[in-house]
Amino acid sequence: MKYDAKFVAVLISLIFYLFISIFTVNNPGLYYDEVLFVRPIVSKNTSVYELTLWGMRIPIMVMPYLGALKSWIYAPIAQLIGISAFSIRILPILTGMFSLILIYKTARILLDNKSALIFLIILSTLPSYIFHVRLDWGPVALSILFRSILIYSLVKYTKTKNITWLAVAGFSIGLGVFDKLTHLWFVFGIIGGILLVKPKLKYITSTDTMLFLIFILVGSTPLLLYIYSAGLHQILGEPIIKYQEFLAHFGYKSWLLIWTLSGNSVFDVINNHDILRDCVIHQPNLSQCILKIRPFAFPFSIAPILLIPAIFKALFSKNTYLKISVISFIAIFLQIVISYRARGSHHLMMLFPLAEFIIFSYILSHNRIFVKYLLFFLLISSNLITDFKYLASIKTNGGTGLWSARIYDLCNYIKTNPHFYVFMDWGFQAPLSVLNCSSSYSELFWEFISLDNEEQLINKLHRLTIDPNVLFVFHSSKYTVFHNPRKFFLKMIELYRLETIQFDQLFQPEYELIKIARDNSKNADYSEINFKMKSFIGDIRFLGYNLVGLSKCDPHQLDLYCGEQGSVIILYLYFLVDSPVQKNYKVFVHLIGEINNPQTQNPVWDQMDQEPHNWTYPTTQWIPGQIIKDRYELRIPQSAPEGKYFISIGMYDSNSMSRLPTTGDSADGNSIKIANILVKK
């Protein structure tokens, strides 16, 4: 069988795209955006909206602006080959290949075969396209596919007047908007471009328009169900910039566009955590972010330089499709400018493939063949050099921060070390949960982003430390996304005078694993209590005591001890609370005799009053469920006469001096009698 040369060239282009996309596919590490759609498959209650049909749970929306369409497509892949970095990334990679095929087929309609092939070669080597799609940052892959379908079907409709293509266009719009609400930017841009260039489309009948709208509704049905259930306000949360901010955002996002077209954006983000954190995730300082972003780094791409003249030339072109493309491009870009949260290069990928088509058409319009092919050569050469720069970096470094390949090492550590992991920063739970590293984890950092309710949040954090199995997981300081949770943690350590054990040497420089060193003088097991009791001091449980320093007088009378004048009594008291204690109470431990002490004129012969644990562990800091072991020391005075004594304990408010009521074993209204002592000379 003989193959057409153009077919071979197309095949080579697609194979090259697949090679670059799949090379070391595990790296960089899995990122939040690309695993977001896997979570509804592996975990319940991870979608914002789902339906149950015939006993089967169907996720509809994974976020208020993101549909679960990718989850539906990915589910059979996960079932077939399991969940891994490869299976997660192969879907957007193949989606990207189908988009390239559709764009090539569209270009063959609008251009000649040779030009369409050159355009395909440029796109199949384009680093901004390959690596945005490979990592599905945004996510962008399905959105680009639906854009490609929309453009192709609209072009086919204008050429053939076949109403089927209009139905396909409408359905692709509906699915695209369901997949990601910002797909509307592209839809509004395209429709606006068509209406401005061709305000009177005589061949479109009312029946065509109705069919077009019906298929839009059909494609977006899942989204409409969500809006009906949750309300329109749930999807209209995208803030718009103030008019005073327009110039600043226009300048910043123009710089972002240049950065994206240069092919350096994804490379910089996966290798420079500061850009991702400070300029994409958080509210950016626009002037500082412009300084951090380097669109003209080596290798230098001519695409950003050609864009401005290409736009102006296209505006005055007689080519209807080119003019629609450039007006649509401008309309989409302005929507991105006024959208406050659109601040990453993945948002600027909404302009694909219009920006590339405008630049390509500009190069194609040159009369001098030498200049034309020189520009094509420079464009493809810079693409290839950038592609291999990416691959070298990905293989060597594996990404940094939120894109670090060390996430796989952390996953393996979690699998082999069964602790309860508390994630104290963004970017851990999603990839680790879909990789099935552990089911024993909690993501708490959201509660600690705001500095409000500081005391309450620190107490909540402290209550976690009762469990010796808890490991707190942070990004290292260099790669921290949200700093406040770390501040809360450090305040808790300082306030409660805790010691920590760090395991970060295993994962430096990316992660820190911190364990609270247990202080056995404060915490205890119920089994170590020798004399157990069931008593209450207010709402505080008194579990019993251990007494050291005296011998038992009678083995059959467990609470009777023998002592001499001058003997030291060491007492360990055991307490437990079921809920946080609202006040700081002092504990009193009194040695009570049968006769009054001449010095005190009362039956107290020795006493020790203090806040628990030698004033270092006030009752307001006690953790519910934690058994508190508290040490006290009494001395039998040399002047104490022979006879029977007992030890009385309780608690009181140091401000009002009023004792807490006592109930249960050996309770006496406001004290508890715990040990009888027989004093002999």
Image: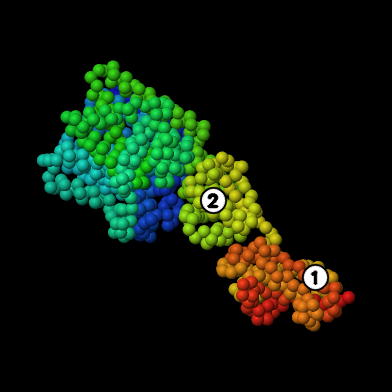
| Residue 99 visible somewhere in the drawing | no
Q: Nearer the viewer, residue 146 or 390?
A: 390
Q: Quadrant of residue 307?
A: top left
Mark 2: few, some, or many residues within 10 Å (few <14, many ≥20)? some
> Which residue shows up at 25% across the image and 40% down it?
331
Q: Nearer the viewer, residue 477 or 322?
A: 477
Q: Nearer the viewer, residue 322 or 457?
A: 457
Q: Quadrant of the C terminus?
A: bottom right
Q: Quadrant of the N terminus?
A: top left
> Which residue shows up at 35% across the image and 22% down it?
378
Image location (x, y in percent) of residue 340: 34, 46
Quick check: 351 above or below 636?
Answer: above
Q: Amino acid at mark 1?
A: Arg
Q: Quadrant of residue 98?
A: top left
The residue indicated by pointer 2 is 486
- Give the secondary structure at mark 1: strand
Quick check: 341 above or below 303?
Answer: below
Mark 1: few, some, or many residues within 10 Å (few <14, many ≥20)? some
Image location (x, y in percent) of residue 552: 82, 73
Taking the image as shown, residue 618 lies to the left or right of residue 117, namely right
Q: Which mark is residue 635?
A: 1
> Which residue shows up at 36% across the image and 46% down it?
341
Q: Earlier in the sequence, mark 1 or mark 2?
A: 2
Q: Amino acid at mark 2?
A: Arg
- Give the secondary structure at mark 2: helix
Q: Residue at the far bottom: name it.
A: 595
Q: Are marks 1 and 2 in contact (CB under 8 Å)?
A: no
> Which residue shows up at 46% across the image and 31% down it?
391
| Residue 473 visible somewhere in the drawing | yes
Q: Nearer the viewer, residue 263 or 99?
A: 263
Taking the image as shown, residue 150 lies to the left or right of residue 91, namely left
Q: CA distance from mark 1 to mark 2?
A: 45 Å
